[in-house]
Amino acid sequence: MILESVQNEADVVRLSLGEGSPLDTFRTELTNYRVNHEHASAFRRFLKYISLLPALFLSPRHYNSLKQKVASNLLYARARAKFLPFYRPHHVDRTGDWNL
């Protein structure tokens, strides 16, 4: 699991530099999602597949540029927060006093 995560992060960096193919981007993004969101529901995995469709048709550099533009869009952020909030693990305390 650790080696897979390290390799995946290296692949993400390589793709962000514009190397690789659209299929590499698709595979790497899917692996990254699976590793980082292992408890995602089937619906969220389906949405991830849909969101990765552009990765199959764009170069890695163009896909990463598109992904950054979408993520920084205020309208997208508001819609995401309202309809599909980010998963928050129940075992993580986000209310504690961290300044001790």
Image (cartoon, grey):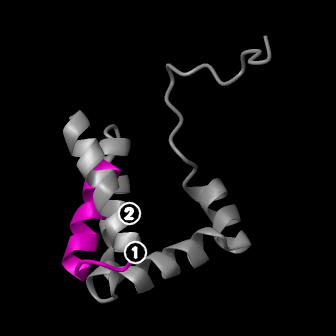
- Report crowding for label 1: few under 14, some 14 to 19, many 20 or more residues within 10 A (C-alpha): few
Circle on res. 17 = 1
Q: Is residue 27 magenta?
A: yes
Tell me: 60 left or right of 26. right
The amino acid pointed to by label 2 is Val
Residue at (45, 76) in percent of width and height: 64
Disc tally is 2
Q: Position of residue 17 (x, y in %)?
A: 40, 75
User: The disc labelled 1 sits on which kind of residue?
Assistant: Leu
Q: Is residue 69 above or below residue 6?
A: below
Quarter assignment of residue 84? bottom right
Quadrant for the N terminus, please: top left
Q: CA distance from mark 2 to mark 1?
A: 6 Å
Q: Which residues are magenta?
A: 18-34
Q: Position of residue 38 (x, y in %)?
A: 31, 39
Height in image: 72 above or below 41? below
Q: Reply above or below: 35 against 52.
A: above
